[in-house]
Image: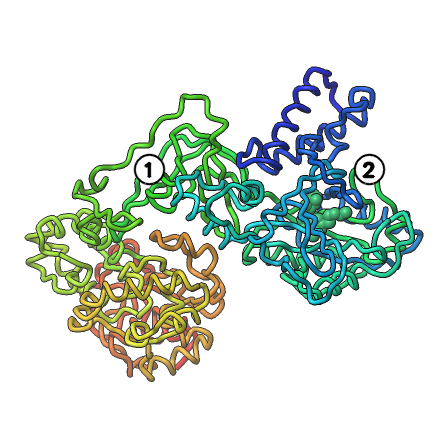
Amino acid sequence: MAEVDRTQYEADKQRLREAAEAYYNGTDLLLDDATFDALSRQLAAIEAAHPQWAAGDSATDQVAAGAAVAGDVAHTVPMLSLGNVFDPDELGDWLAGVAKRAGTEDLVFTVEPKFDGLALSARYEEGRLTRLVTRGDGYHGEDVSYAAPNIVGLPPRLTEPVAIEVRGEVMLTTAQFEAANEARMTHGDRPFINARNGAAGALRGAADRKYPIAMSFFCYDVITPETTSPEGAGAGRYVTALQRAHDLGITIGVETISGIDTYAAAEVPAAVTAIEERRGSLPFAIDGAVIKVDDYAARAKIGSSSKAPNWAIAYKYAAEEGMSKLIDIIWQVGRTGVITPRAVIEPVMVSGTTITYATLHNPDDITRKGFRMGDTVIVKRAGEVIPRLEAPVVNLRDGSETEIEFPEVCPRCGSPIDKSEARWRCSRGRQCGLAEAVTYAVSREAWDIEGLGKKQVENLVASGRVGGVDDVFTLTETDLIEFGKVAPANAPKITAEIERARTSPLARTITALGIRGTGRAMSRRIAKHFRTMDAFRAAGIPELEAVDGIGTEKSAMIVLELAELAPVIDHLSELGVSMADELDPAVAEVAAEVAPDSVDTAAGSAGAAGAGEPGAEEAGADADGAAGAAAQPLAGMKVVVTGSMVGPLADLSRNEMNELIESLGGRATGSVSKNTDLLVAGEKGGSKRAKAEQLGVRIVSEDEFAALIGRVG
Ligand code: IVH
């Protein structure tokens, strides 16, 4: 270990204590979990190397670093803390150590979630709840019986008139946390920073709060004469005691995850991972798993230290929260005109990723949580991909923080903002981002209309000629030249591209609509699932949820979006834009022979591109799936067809050829350019053939093309 000096040690000890005090007693946070754990381990190492420094006043040898309020109720049995391990190796070492102490390899373990709340002891006499006591310093706690009516999971009366003490974690579930903050703000109180910190505030403030805050209790320890005194006549099993508490009407921690199961040592790591995998979808916060020896006699043999039992350990998962500083807010206007604040923060590592941006749900979030520029902030990156700004750490302010400025008008177009809902929107709605929306619709991601770029689209929108993505299909050569400022020589190519786009696979048209929450990969899945625009439009929330990657929130949003887009979709349909994905039987037959996997996905490679869907709202956020590559002989190729087909492909019309190309992973385009990879030249392929020759583009006959795609005549 590096040389450490005593002054630094004392300062760090003080810092750890203050943080622990805030953690256990108050509504504020001084250190995030990961930093707290790291500091605590560092101090433990220093104390091991310099025991004389810590004599009588160790920071790491006491519950809550010696900071917790002791209270005046003596605990029947000390309420100990838990040791921590942080990776599979450390867990393996712990399991081996326990087996050694117990003198047997045949131990049986329980694996439970580690709830992120506060330890609480509940005493029942004759089946009635008589007393609630906090952990305090582990030997004496505070009486918080007044909170009993607000705690779900601890019934006032048990199913039998027995005397029993149960211990467990009191915490706020995600729903309770949200309800609590709703109530706090209604009553002018500052919202809780996070659920754990809320549990402390909810419990301790329950005595003099005018409104109730519901909490939950999850039992993980049962104290009866049979189960107690680890050093004494412990007999029986932990799982039996848990079952008993459950039968008496108390909520047991493990039942939130699995049954009351046990595991052999070799099975423990998998059980720990299984809980971690469910972490993001649980209705409450957990920060690890707790592994315990099941048998009380074995526990007695293994023993405890003054701080924690040796027969139990907490396996801590990677922290989902970090602390950073708010340095800027960028007001983004989406394709649909929604204005969202995006926080720029100092880089911070959270669950293994460096984060520099975080979302704030809406402008109201800033006011409600009271953020100021320059604040120390808690950043959370839970199951979701996009990190969120959770709360400011008010007691770390130094006075240099400033008010956050809100935009008065739409930051993109300067129009008034519609603030009637929590989610602000430019009063021009989709019109505000129209040029952007149309540019996206004609991009390679969607209709792929070559020649129509950002500039031309901006001209068309500014002139009023294009008022929605649907208007693209009404453009004539004259319009393109006059309103889009397109070079006259290019206009016919663009109209040809527009013609081709009319037969786009459904997925491309869905992408082009720019439905919030759906990027290209999601649009493909939707098209594959519903096959027709009508079926998609008719879908309600449950039908939408059947699509991989669409949850309740997203499906509700899609329903609203589709309602708003109804006139656009109707117009597209009137303009002859393809609204179904049923391949023409002739095409399907060819495609099936060539690439059996791609038949049902006219849009080309489907699936595989689902990862990172929350980000898919942005254009191009999702990539082409690679899964279908083997069956996609034209993957990534721009193919132009010219002349009428003879030979093996003679049955196919131009549109059908284009569809076939798309179904094999290629992009069918209307005109030859230097970007073209292949020209399929049928009979009389005059000017396109000449252009291709001039540009050195590969030219194949129908026969060669048929061979290339695996359909030899
Ligand atoms: S057992 C003697 N089981 O973690 C063993 N504790 O860091 C006592 N905790 O004080 C604790 N979930 O507040 C146990 N399933 C669980 C737990 C759990 C959360 C908390 C508890 C404890 C702290 C130790």
Q: Is residue 442 left or right of residue 186?
A: left
Q: Is residue 541 left or right of residue 109?
A: left
Task: Indicate whether 41 appears above or below 640.
Answer: above
Q: Is residue 394 left or right of residue 316?
A: left
Locate the C terminus by quadrant: bottom left
- Tell me where residue 558 sits by quadrant: bottom left
Callout 2 secondary element: loop
Residue sitting at 43 percent across and 39 percent down? Answer: 189
Q: Is mark 2 within 8 Å of ligand 1?
A: no
Residue sitting at 83 percent across and 39 percent down? Answer: 305
Residue 306, numbered circle: 2
What distance separates the C-alpha of mark 1 from that of mark 2? 51 Å
| Kind of residue sitting beneath label 2 | Ser
Q: Residue 195: x and y, percent?
A: 54, 46
Residue 457 visible to an observer of this rendering: yes
Callout 1 secondary element: strand
Locate the N terminus by quadrant: top right
Residue designated by label 1? 330
